[in-house]
Structures are given as C-alpha cells and as structure tokens.
Amino acid sequence: MVAPAPPTEAHIWQLLEEVTDPEVPVLSILDLGIVRAVRVEGEQITVTITPTYSGCPAMNTIATDIRLRLLAEGYTKLTINNQLSPAWTTDWMTKAGREKLEAYGIAPPIDGTASGHVLNLFGKETAVRCPLCKSEHTHLVSQFGSTACKALYQCDDCREPFDYFKCHS
C-alpha cells in the first residue's frame, strides 16, 4: 500500500464532508454542524464531535464512519473525541443542510428559534412550514417523530404528515 500524503486540516475537513448522518443520509456531519474541531499534529488526527443531544444513538455510528473514512485514505493515527459542552444547537446547522432537509421532506428548524424559543414558553406555536406543499397551515401531532430529534407534524392543506427537525439550544 502506498503511504498517504501527510494529513492537513483542510483535507480532513473535505473528507468529513463525505460522512453522512445515519438517520438523515442527505446530511453530512458538516451540514449538521456536529464537527467542532479537526486537529492535525504530524500523523495524529483528532476530530472532535458534539452530539445533537445527549444520548444520541447515532454518535457511535458517526464516530465509526469518521474512522472508516479516514482509514480508507490511509490515515491510521486517529482519535475521535465527543464534546458535550457547549451543547449542540440547531443554529449550528448550515444553510445548505437546512435546504437539503426540506428537499428530503423534513421541515428544517426555524432560524433563530433554538436560541430564543420564548414564543413556545408562553403557549404560542411557531409556524412550521410543510416541506411538501410549503403551506404554513400545519399542526403538531407528536413531540416525537421518527427519531428523538424530530417532531411529527401534519399539513392542514395537503394533509401529509412530515417530520420537523426540532430546535435545540
């Protein structure tokens, strides 16, 4: 086997763009904003990730997928760290990631609501747009959707159910 080129942070970030979320495969882990840092010291590569919420079952799979992607490039000195603080927030998702969610049929988190969910504290619901017909006439069916990080909504116009990627701050 040919020895890989010495790793650079820029190259590692490019490789991480190819690692997808196992629960929402249209999103890369960079789209999600869970990669907090990449450090390269000689041949040692350290990737720091933050779970979307404590106890997220996908984190072990994501760490394994990161390791496998970097091993495929010939990088063997790898450390994957989990960082819980600061806690992940949906505000860290990229604009491209939000667009990919909607195209996939999942309503993306509403901009700015992760850091200021004041309306929900007082019983006012934030309008969640249907990713299928784009109507804002929707209602919450369940706080728990297909995964713990999503809620189940239904559109009152097209009547289709859909997941909403819940805001976290």
Image (cartoon, rainbow, N blue to C red):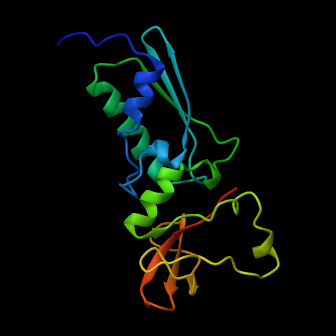
Percent x, y for residue 4?
28, 13
What's the residue at 58%, 42% (across, down)?
50
Q: Provide residue 137's location: percent of width, then percent of height.
A: 57, 87
Give the farthest residue toward the front: 134
Q: Is 66 placed left or right of 39 in the picture?
A: left
Residue at the image position 34 percent from the left and 27 percent from the top:
70
Location of residue 57 with respect to 70 vertically, above or below: below
Q: In this view, does 96 lie above or below 69?
A: below
- Quadrant where the N terminus sits is top left
Residue 34 sits in quarter: top right
Asked whether 142 or 160 is in front, the reply is 160
x%, y% of residue 13? 45, 29
Residue appearing at x 53%, y 52% in the figure: 95
Q: How many badges with numbers are in the image?
A: 0
The image shows residue 28 at horizontal and vertical percentages of 41, 46
Residue pictured at 54% horizontal, 48% vertical: 94
Q: Which of 131 and 23 is in front in this view?
A: 131
- The C terminus lies in which quarter of the figure? bottom right
In the rendered structure, the answer to whether residue 5 lies left or right of residue 169 reads left
Q: Splitting the image into 4 quarters, where does residue 112 fall?
A: bottom right
